[in-house]
Amino acid sequence: MITLLVATRNAHKVAEIRQILSHHWRCLSQLDFPGAPAIVEDAASFAGNARKKAEGLAAWLAGHPELTPDKADDAPFYILADDSGLEVDALAGAPGVHSARFAVAKTGGPANALDAANNAKLLRLLMGVPPARRTARFRCVLALAPLRPPPVGHATLLFEGSCEGRIGLSPAGTGGFGYDPLFLPEGCTQSLAELGESVKNTISHRARALQKLRDYLS
């Protein structure tokens, strides 16, 4: 069985990825490796951050073979990292790679902001912008770095997904996380937080990127 180690300690993200991938592969996360180092996400693009996380964690784990489950097995083992965020056209693509830290005074720091604070800042910046000009998209880039077999001649692969939509005038719904209560997918009158997991996990940026990953590994 293929093992994927998801390079995140975000429990919401881990649960979402596991649900989308279903039972196809064994899916671990950094929550299973508490000693793993934190990778600073300071790249200028989603692809750069995803690649940095995947390759950084792969290098650390390669140096600690005793931590690798089934280390005597030759079954494929990959590090999967994702970087994703919201791009708002009226804000010239912001918050982009700073989506999780949007409300933090100094972007690029290690700490993320609370979802409510990020949403409040976004609404404040879009105050007075009419619905027709509130177009936006969620974008996700996945980086897949091989740990086993050894990554000789196996470059890190990237898979991208996006979901077009617009930013609502106020938060709606209690599901999801991040900017989900503000984001209305194209053709929908409800936010991602209102649509529920079963719908979100078929149309979201992450779901579309994971579908490409699943097609590749199948």
Image: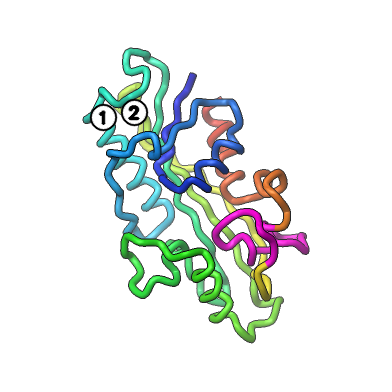
Question: Residue 80 vs residue 21: left or right?
Answer: left
In the rendered image, residue 171, in percent from the top left (x then y), is placed at 65, 69
Q: How many numbered circles are shown?
A: 2
| Residue 144 shows in this picture | no
Res. 124 mark: none
Q: Describe residue 40's horizontal placement relative to residue 47 as left or right.
A: left
Q: Which range is magenta?
A: 172-193
User: Which residue is pictured at 36% across the width and 41% down the height?
Assistant: 54
- Relative depth, front residue between 113 and 47: 113
Task: Using the image, tell me which numbered label, if any, was put on residue 147.
Answer: 2
Which of disc 2 and disc 1 is earlier in sequence?
1
Outermost left residue: 63
Instruction: Classify mark 2: helix, strand or loop.
Output: strand
Q: Quadrant of the C terminus?
A: top right
| In the image, residue 146 above or below residue 131 | above
CB-based contact (under 8 Å), mark 1 and mark 2: yes
Residue at numbered disc 1 = 62
Q: Which of 127 and 158 lies nearest the eye of the viewer?
A: 127
Estimate the x, y position of residue 92 in percent, counting from the top left.
Answer: 51, 74
Q: Is residue 114 left or right of residue 73?
A: right
Nearest the viewer among 30 and 217 is 30
